[in-house]
Every structure is written in structure tokens, then in C-alpha cells.
Image (cartoon, coloured by chain):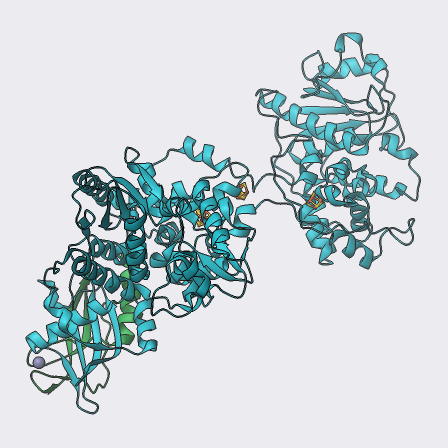
Chain colours: A cyan, B green
């Protein structure tokens, strides 16, 4: 399990929680994004609350801030930035204080602020709020410094008087009209624990030369406990309102540290204007011109303010979430997801509520491709599954169905390993993979025939499963065993070059059996003369959109061979945006559809709906899942090797779990008989039970992960033992049987042609008779 | 789930014993947890009926709860 520092390191790669550009550029980090959202809804009080939280004296600063954030606003990339300053003014003019920040209990230390400009006012307010005994002295009759020169229309004097009241409320001792000669200022340093000089009122020249220039990060002067800031920028002499606030706040924090005797310099990067790593994509967002108030003096009307705030694009990242149906479903972005997974692993006693989430990711790595910092969600989820398996916390129901299906594909009923008929060596080995064998057994035969005819020196055949379900399920032991057996079989056949029809098998062999030479079927076919005459006969009338499988994400050669083949077949192909490296998973990846069937269905629909055209897949699972989602979709092999009896390839049914299961066994049996003249071993006894299943019931069984084979076992067991229930009214039978861990119940009606299946369901709870 | 009762009138009868089913207390278990529940069973051979609503409802719920423990 990862430790805290690894967690932090990976978490930091997701920048969704970084500040938006406006907030980072704001010296006091007003939450501009939320402010805009509130104003866009017409919630002026909500907006005011955000200003009250971040700003000292919102009635002043909100009116006259010089908005340095403006030029950083992301909307500027596609037109006019947000008029944040004007909107803040609108907000404070039209509202009263909503949030009064609390005053902390009194703490030690007496502080004097010399000069009543906005930086001095801010420092005094911040320190007083923190419970420090604070005195503010000004030579003027009223506080405000340069602000006193502002036009009454821009900043009414009463806002400054109100500020005096606020300061007094927080306990600041105000001394106005106080003579402040240099000598007096110097003497204050010994009378108080800390001094802040506001350079807006006290020109730098009046400080003793020994004081030096304030340090830019801490605003500390030479002598201990003395600080200075505010006023015009020394180089340009320009005056910035928000710079006064920034300096006052920075000085107050320095003084706090000084009084608490902690480092003045450590960890202050977060203060003031910051850089942000936020990543926001603006392509596709329409530019909207700035809303200018009809009467500039009066500022925005309610409607104008709403419209201007409504231009905010709510800067955030979520680029991966926008595309990934899984992240959307669980309402997480990778950083929060990782946190939950980490906490889930840390649970010793109690409910591991993130299990389902961990098992629902398709491990497709689309997010990692999209993320500006390659956030590795798939790695995290898969590693977490491995740990759950290792620690015996993996819920048995999550993957068992898929793993049993895999074991069946690896069993004697389905596997077949042979040299080409009449040959005792193989230069090549055709490896269709369990899913193509299950989905389109006829196509496997035709493809194999073509390869035998076209390729020299023997093409062997290996019907099996690469073991990817175990890999996805975090079952390391099972996966390693499967891979080892594959290597043994491959060696027995004389180490031929493996031709894979499935991109998952290929990706897996490349990663875990790198020493074995592998090539994708598509690359092989692209190098051969294709039987185009037959394809032409079935060519679809409409253009098709290609759907790359998620395991082809990093297999550029294969993807381009597929496109070449399409061109050579004369297929009219249209590309969509989420193909190639950005392609979606169809719902099979990572066993998503097994651990979370409704989400698997959504994933298939999302993938199919990336284009309005009918689809062309070249992964058997993509083909079947997209077909199941109701989209017309063909498999590319359907156009190269059309079967004799097949109808329109675009309308071929999804065989479902059961169909694939039985196709595999039948394929072995038939190929063995047709090509090698051998009979397969006898099937299990229950295989003789005949079933009659309507389409609706078949769909129900598929969704409940109940195979026809399971049903045969139940009925066979009932016949053997005579144990079952009966409903005398309609002669329905109800029987149950537990082949391994799941108990299946089947309601059926024996008839002359077979057993009509009415219903079936299952549970994992053990009944008394099974307890022993 | 303990002390829960799933007693309902049912048309199902034990085919072997030709007996109507009767409410009986039985122990069911999953992942080291045992529950005493009342189910319809054959009074003669003890064959238990798990109706669909129970299997796909309460039982499933409890199974998943236990799996996440
Ligand atoms: S793409 Fe996703 S993981 Fe990457 S930074 Fe953005 S929100 Fe975070
Ligand atoms: S668009 Fe909105 S959130 Fe983005 S930088 Fe501008 S004001 Fe901030
Ligand atoms: S399903 Fe794919 S895109 Fe979504 S989180 Fe998992 S790996 Fe990333
Ligand atoms: Zn009985």
C-alpha cells in the first residue's frame, strides 16, 4: 500500500483543486469563480459573503479595487475578460455586510501602526481580529491615506468613516491627528513589541536610514520588530489599492509570526499573487462580448450584472471527467477518487464503501492520456484490486462470474492447440482469443482458412484465453499461471509467431511475454491480398465510423493497418474525435460490465454515441457491447470473411454471455472434427438437457449473469435427485443447485421438445442443506 | 437479516414428498455470518424455498454488505 508521501505526490498531479486564474492573480485570493456563480444567479448576498470573507473593508476595496486579476482571466483567451472590478462594485453598492469575521481571544503583544492608509488599516484590522492589542496612529484627521483623495462618487467619505467604526469595534485604538516626527516613530519601536509603518502616509524618506528597505516577502525592516509597506510602487510611483491591502495583510502575518517567535520566512509562497497550475480548455467555448453598463456612472443594473457574471466559464480542469463515464458516475475527479481509495485500504474494521468504485473502473487509461499530468487512475485501481485480493478483502461477487468464464475458456472444453492439419511445424500461430471465438466462431474458421492458404510454412491454431480477466481482477496468481501455460504451449508448438485477432491479447503478450514474437491479425491481413470480391457484396450503403478498442490506445501500427484495410475494401469510413489515443472503453475493460453492469451499459452507449454513424469495430467485445446498446455495428472481419448464412453484419445480435460461452465449446468441437478429423471428448452429462428460452428470458438471464449451462446443471440435478418444487396449478417446476459458490434457482416447465425456462435467479447465501 | 421472516402463502409444493410448504426457522450463512430466518420449507424432507423477491432483494443486500466488511 502506498504511504502518505506517495499519496501526496500522486494527488498533486491532479490540479483540479488549484486556484482558478482570477483567484491566483488576486493578491488576497477572492474566490472570484464562486462570486461570479452567485451573481449569475442573482444572489447578491451570497456574492457579498465571499467578499466579506476575503476582503478587509469590502465597502472600500469592493468599490475601488484596480483588478489585477483582469488580465489573467481565462475568458481573455477567447475575447473579453470578466469585468471583475465592476461587478465587485455592483455587489457592495447593492448590499450590506453579510459575514462579520469573528475576533479571536486576546493574545500577547502590543502593536502600533504608524500611518492610516489602507495598508495600515488592513494591518490593524487583521491584527485586532487575531486578538492583538493594536494602536493605529495617523497624522490626518481621518484614516484612508491616498483614498481620501478619491472622488466622492467613486468612494464616498462615509465608507472611510464606517471603516473607523469597524476598526474600533474590533478594539483598535485609533489616534488621529497625531504628530508623527521621525524621532517619535523611532521611539515607538521601544515602546511597542512591533511597529508597522504605512508608507502611504509616512514617505520612505522619513524613516531612519538605518531602517533600510522593507524585505519584499516579510516587509521587515532592519531593526527587529519593525515592518513597513504600502504606498506607491517605488519604481513607477503608481498607486494600487489592492497592493495596499496585500502589504497590510502580509505585514500583519509577519508581525504575528514575530510575536509568536516563529520563522518570518518559512512557507510564505501561498501569500499574495500566485502562479496556478490550473488547466482549463477554452476551445469550443463561444466568445461573448463584455457587458458594458448603459450608464457607466451608475454601474451595472441587476440584469447587466447577471449577464456579465454569467460570462464566467467557471474555470476548472475536469478534462478527464468530461470524457469518462465512470468518473462521472461516481462523481469524483481523480484526486478525490485516490483519497477515497486510500482511505478504503486503510479500513481495518468497518465497511469498505469504495470497493464497488475500485472495481468499476475500466482501466482504459483514457484519463491518463487526457490529463496534463498523466494522472494514473487505472494503475491505482488495479493495484488496489491486487491488494484487495491479497488481503482477502475482494468481494467474491465482483469478478467471480468473469473468472469462471475465463476458467471455462481455459478448460479442455474450449482449448485447442494444434499445428496446421498435415503439418508438424508451425511458423505462425493463429490466436483468435476467447472473445472472438465466443462472438463469431464462423469468422474464426474463415480467418484461419485464409491464413493457412496465404501464409507459408504452417499456421498453427491455439484456442484459449490470454488471461486478461484475471489481470484486471487483480488475481496475480491466476494470471501468472495462465501466462506461464501460454508460454509452455507456445514453446511446444516450436515458438511460432503469434497472430492475435484481439488487441487485448496483443497488448498483454507484449507486456508479459515480450520474448514471444507477436503480430496483430490486422497487420498480417494488411500485408496480404484480401478477398475483396466477397466483401463488396456485403458493403454497407452508409458510411461507418471506426471504433478503436481501448486496448489499441498505444498500438498505432495496428490502428493504421485497420484503416488501410478499410480503404482497400472500399469501406466508407468516418473518424470521430474520441478514437485513437483518446478512445473510450466499451464497458468490458477492467471487467467494468461484470462488477457494475449498469455502468458497463452506459459506457457502451457513450462509445456508440460518439458518432451518429453506424459503427465498425475490430474488437469482438466492442462489437458485441455496442450492438447490445442498440447501435448498428459490424466487426471488420464480417466484411472480409462474410459467413454463408449471416445476414447484415451491422445487425448481428449480441450473443450475450451464454452465447459466447457455448460458441467457444462448439468452435473447438467443430474445428477439431472438420480440420483434424478428431472427436472432442464427451461433454458433461448435463449438456444433454434441452432448453427453450424466449428472448426476454434470455436477456434477463444475461443481465443476471446466469448461463444456459448453469440452468442445465440445475435441471439435471433436479432430475437426478428428484428434489424440486412443483406448482400443481400450472405444473411449473422450481429447482435449485449450487455448482460452485452461487446457488441458482430455475423455474421451468418440462415439455416434449425440452424445458421451457420461465425464470431464474441466484444467491450466494448458503442454505441449511448446503452448509455442511 | 436475523429474526427476519419470509413467510408467505405459496403454491409451491415439495415434488418428492407432495407436501405443502410450512414456515420453519433455518440458519442461512454467508462469509462467516449466520442468520436465523424463517422460510417456507418441506416439513418432511426440509427442502427450502428461496423466492425470487428474497434472493434478489434482502439476500442480495445482505450479501453485498458482508462482502464489503
Ligand atoms: S485531467 Fe483529471 S486528473 Fe488530470 S488534472 Fe484534470 S481533473 Fe485532475
Ligand atoms: S472565467 Fe471566471 S473563473 Fe475563469 S478566470 Fe475568468 S473570472 Fe475566473
Ligand atoms: S474508466 Fe478509463 S478514463 Fe475512466 S477513470 Fe478508469 S481508466 Fe480513467
Ligand atoms: Zn420434501
Q: Picture quarter containing residue A561?
A: top left
**Whole-percent x, y for residue B67 in the image:** 27, 56
* Residue at the image position 23 percent from the left and 49 percent from the top: A461
Q: How many marks?
A: 0
Q: Is residue A397 left or right of residue A524?
A: left
Q: Is residue A352 left or right of residue A297?
A: left
**Whole-percent x, y for residue A522 in the image:** 40, 47
* Residue at the image position 31 percent from the left and 58 percent from the top: A446
Q: With respect to residue A66, does A575 lie above or below?
A: below
Q: Picture quarter containing residue A471?
A: top left
Q: Quadrant of the C terminus of chain A?
A: bottom left
**Whole-percent x, y for residue A506 in the image:** 34, 43
Q: With respect to residue A65, does A659 lie above or below?
A: below
Front in this rendered view, residue A337 or A690: A690
Q: Is residue A295 left or right of residue A277?
A: right
**Whole-percent x, y for residue A440 in the image:** 32, 61
Front in this rendered view, residue A320 or A141: A320
Front in this rendered view, residue A389 or A404: A404
Q: Quadrant of the N terminus of chain A?
A: top left
Front in this rendered view, residue A501 or A144: A501
Residue B68 shows in this picture: no
Q: Is residue A101 left or right of residue A71?
A: left
Q: With respect to residue A385, does A146 lie above or below?
A: above
Amino acid at each position: 500500500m502506498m504511504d502518505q508521501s506517495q499519496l501526496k505526490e500522486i494527488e498533486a498531479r491532479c490540479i483540479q483543486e488549484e486556484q482558478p486564474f482570477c483567484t491566483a492573480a488576486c493578491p488576497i485570493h477572492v474566490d472570484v469563480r464562486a462570486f461570479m456563480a452567485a451573481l449569475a444567479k442573482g444572489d447578491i448576498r451570497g456574492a457579498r459573503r465571499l467578499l466579506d470573507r476575503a476582503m478587509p473593508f469590502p465597502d472600500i476595496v469592493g468599490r475601488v479595487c484596480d483588478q489585477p486579476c483582469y488580465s489573467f482571466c481565462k475568458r481573455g483567451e477567447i475575447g473579453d475578460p470578466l469585468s471583475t472590478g465592476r461587478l465587485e462594485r455592483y455587489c457592495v453598492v447593492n448590499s450590506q455586510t453579510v459575514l462579520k469575521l469573528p475576533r479571536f481571544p486576546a493574545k500577547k503583544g502590543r502593536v502600533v501602526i504608524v500611518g492610516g492608509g489602507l495598508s495600515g488599516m488592513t494591518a490593524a484590522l487583521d491584527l485586532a481580529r487575531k486578538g492583538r492589542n493594536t494602536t493605529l496612529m495617523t497624522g490626518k484627521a481621518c484614516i484612508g491615506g491616498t483614498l481620501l483623495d478619491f472622488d466622492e462618487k467613486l468612494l464616498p467619505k462615509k465608507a472611510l468613516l464606517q471603516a473607523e467604526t469597524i476598526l474600533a469595534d474590533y478594539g483598535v485604538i485609533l489616534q488621529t491627528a497625531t504628530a508623527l516626527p521621525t524621532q517619535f516613530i523611532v521611539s515607538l519601536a521601544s515602546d511597542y513589541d512591533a511597529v508597522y509603518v504605512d508608507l502611504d502616509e509616512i514617505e520612505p524618506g522619513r524613516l531612519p536610514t538605518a531602517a533600510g528597505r522593507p524585505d519584499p516577502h516579510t516587509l521587515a525592516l532592519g531593526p527587529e520588530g519593525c515592518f513597513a509597506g504600502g504606498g506607491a510602487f517605488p519604481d513607477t510611483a503608481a498607486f494600487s489599492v489592492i497592493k495596499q491591502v496585500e502589504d497590510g495583510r502580509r505585514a500583519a502575518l509577519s508581525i504575528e509570526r514575530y510575536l509568536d517567535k516563529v520563522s518570518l520566512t518559512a512557507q510564505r509562497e501561498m501569500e499574495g499573487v500566485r502562479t496556478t497550475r490550473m488547466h482549463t480548455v477554452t476551445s469550443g467555448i463561444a466568445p461573448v462580448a463584455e457587458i458594458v453598463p448603459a450608464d457607466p456612472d451608475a454601474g451595472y443594473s441587476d440584469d447587466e450584472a447577471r449577464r456579465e457574471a454569467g460570462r464566467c466559464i467557471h474555470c476548472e480542469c475536469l478534462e478527464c471527467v468530461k470524457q469518462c463515464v465512470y468518473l462521472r458516475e461516481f462523481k469524483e475527479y481523480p484526486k478525490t477518487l485516490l483519497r477515497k481509495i486510500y482511505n478504503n485500504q486503510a479500513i481495518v474494521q468497518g465497511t469498505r464503501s469504495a470497493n464497488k468504485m475500485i472495481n468499476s473502473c475500466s482501466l482504459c487509461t483514457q484519463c491518463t492520456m487526457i490529463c496534463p499530468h498523466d494522472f494514473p487512475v487505472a494503475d491505482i485501481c488495479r493495484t488496489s484490486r491486487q491488494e484487495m485480493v491479497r488481503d482477502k478483502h475482494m468481494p467474491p461477487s465482483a469478478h467471480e462470474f468473469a473468472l469462471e468464464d475465463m476458467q471455462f475458456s481455459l478448460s479442455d472444453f474450449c482449448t485447442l492447440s494444434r499445428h496446421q492439419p498435415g503439418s508438424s511445424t508451425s511458423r505462425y500461430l493463429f490466436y483468435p482469443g476467447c472473445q472472438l471465438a465466443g462472438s463469431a466462431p464462423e469468422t474464426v474458421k474463415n480467418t484461419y482458412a485464409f491464413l493457412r492458404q496465404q501464409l507459408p510454412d504452417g499456421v498453427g491454431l491455439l484456442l484459449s484465453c490470454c488471461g486478461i480477466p484475471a489481470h484486471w481482477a487483480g488475481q496475480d496468481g491466476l494470471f501468472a499461471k495462465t501466462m506461464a501455460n501460454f508460454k509452455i504451449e507456445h514453446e511446444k508448438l516450436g515458438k511460432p509467431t503469434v497472430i492475435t485477432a484481439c488487441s487485448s491479447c496483443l497488448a498483454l503478450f507484449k507486456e508479459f511475454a515480450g520474448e514471444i514474437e507477436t503480430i496483430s491479425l490486422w497487420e498480417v491481413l494488411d500485408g496480404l491480398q484480401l478477398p475483396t470480391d466477397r466483401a463488396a457484396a456485403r458493403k454497407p450503403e452508409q458510411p461507418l465510423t471506426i471504433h478503436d478498442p481501448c486496448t489499441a490506445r498505444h498500438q498505432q501500427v495496428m490502428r493504421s493497418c485497420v484503416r488501410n484495410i478499410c480503404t482497400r475494401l472500399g469501406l466508407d469510413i468516418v473518424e470521430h474525435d474520441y478514437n485513437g489515443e483518446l478512445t473510450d472503453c466499451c464497458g468490458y475493460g477492467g471487467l467494468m460490465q461484470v462488477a457494475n453492469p449498469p455502468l458497463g451499459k452506459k459506457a457502451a452507449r457513450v462509445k456508440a454515441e460518439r458518432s451518429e454513424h453506424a459503427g465498425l469495430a475490430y474488437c469482438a467485445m466492442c462489437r458485441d457491447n455496442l450492438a447490445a446498446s442498440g447501435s448498428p455495428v459490424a466487426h471488420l472481419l464480417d466484411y472480409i470473411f462474410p459467413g454463408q448464412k449471416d445476414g447484415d453484419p451491422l445487425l448481428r445480435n449480441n450473443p450475450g454471455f451464454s452465447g459466447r460461452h457455448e460458441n467457444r465449446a462448439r468452435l473447438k468441437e467443430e474445428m477439431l472434427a472438420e480440420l483434424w478429423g478428431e472427436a472432442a471428448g464427451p461433454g458433461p452429462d448435463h449438456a444433454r438437457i434441452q432448453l427453450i428460452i424466449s428472448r426476454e428470458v434470455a436477456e434477463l438471464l444475461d443481465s443476471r449473469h446466469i448461463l444456459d449451462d448453469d440452468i442445465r446443471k440445475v435441471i439435471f440435478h433436479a432430475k437426478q435427485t428428484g428434489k424440486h418444487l412443483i406448482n400443481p396449478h400450472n405444473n411449473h417446476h422450481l429447482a435449485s443447485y449450487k455448482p460452485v459458490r452461487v446457488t441458482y434457482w430455475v423455474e421451468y416447465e418440462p415439455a416434449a421438445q425440452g424445458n421451457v425456462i420461465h425464470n431464474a435467479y441466484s444467491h450466494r447465501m448458503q442454505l441449511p442443506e448446503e452448509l455442511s | 437479516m436475523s429474526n427476519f421472516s419470509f413467510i408467505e402463502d405459496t403454491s409451491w409444493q415439495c415434488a418428492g414428498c407432495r407436501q405443502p410448504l410450512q414456515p420453519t426457522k433455518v440458519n442461512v450463512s454467508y462469509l462467516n455470518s449466520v442468520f436465523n430466518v424463517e422460510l417456507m420449507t418441506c416439513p418432511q424432507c426440509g427442502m427450502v424455498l428461496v423466492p425470487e423477491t428474497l434472493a434478489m432483494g434482502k439476500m442480495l443486500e445482505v450479501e453485498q454488505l458482508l462482502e464489503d466488511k
